[in-house]
Image (cartoon, grey):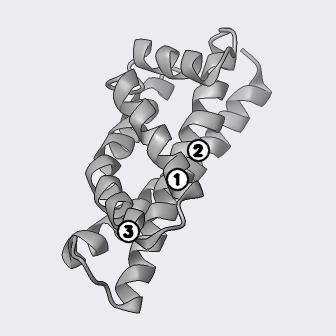
């Protein structure tokens, strides 16, 4: 196991911690606001922060952490689906299918422009944030072996 990879993992885990902390903050604020038909500009701003932070954490997990763990474990990189399946096998995520839904939601966030669909995205993000948060805890537990 390369010392460089372990140092990189340590750095990525620090970024992961920072990302989950701000996501948790946003989630709490948005739960206080709740899901409704109309939002004030300040409330919209809070939900926009939540969706952005959700997407960022999803990317950090999938594009950085899972990939790096596979590399440290000497497993082939494969496709994104392979990475998600490997993460499930290692216990980093509870369910590959649930995590794929998070990834699909992340893509919806990146490409959604109509206000009607944005309200649905807000609801989905509030419901799916615990999946990502749980994954962060699983990753930290898994990485203790290194």
Q: State the separation of the CA atoms marked 1 and 3.
A: 19 Å
* Nearer to the camera, 45 or 36: 36
Q: Residue furthest top?
A: 75
Q: Residue at x 29, y 72 (%)?
A: 30
* Nearer to the camera, 70 or 72: 70
Q: According to the image, label 3 marks what residue?
A: 116
Q: According to the image, label 2 marks what residue?
A: 59
In the rendered structure, which disc, 2 or 3, sits on the residue that comes first in sequence?
2
2 or 3: mark nearer the eye: 3
Answer yes or no: do the residues labelled 2 and 1 have beta carbons within 8 Å?
yes
Image quadrant in which you'd find residue 73: top right
In the image, residue 122 sits, relative to residue 42, either above or below, namely: above
Q: Residue at x 69, y 18 (%)?
A: 71
Task: Quarter of the image for the N terminus: give it.
Answer: top right
1 or 3: mark nearer the eye: 3
Residue 2: % across, % down: 76, 19
Give me the disc on residue 103: none
Answer yes or no: do the residues labelled 1 and 3 have beta carbons within 8 Å?
no
Give me the disc on residue 55: 1
Residue 76: % across, % down: 69, 9
Q: State the separation of the CA atoms marked 2 and 1.
A: 6 Å
Mark 3 surroundings within 10 Å by alpha-carbon count, few (fewer than 14), some (14 through 19), many (20 or more): few
In the image, residue 39 sits, relative to residue 34, either above or below, namely: below
In the image, residue 43 sits, relative to residue 31, either above or below, namely: below
Residue 6: % across, % down: 68, 29
């Amino acid at each position: 196991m390369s010392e460089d990879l372990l140092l990189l993992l340590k750095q990525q885990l620090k970024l992961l911690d920072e990302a989950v902390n701000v996501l948790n903050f946003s989630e709490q604020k948005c739960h206080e606001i709740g899901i409704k038909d109309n939002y004030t500009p300040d409330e919209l701003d809070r939900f926009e922060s939540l969706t952005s932070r959700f997407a960022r954490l999803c990317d950090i997990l999938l594009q950085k952490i899972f990939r790096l763990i596979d590399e440290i474990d000497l497993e082939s990189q494969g496709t994104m689906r392979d990475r998600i399946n490997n993460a499930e096998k290692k216990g980093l995520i509870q369910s590959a299918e649930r995590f794929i839904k998070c990834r699909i939601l992340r893509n919806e966030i990146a490409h959604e422009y109509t206000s009607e669909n944005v309200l649905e995205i807000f609801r989905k993000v509030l419901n799916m944030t615990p999946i990502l948060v749980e994954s962060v805890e699983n990753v930290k537990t898994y990485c203790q072996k290194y």
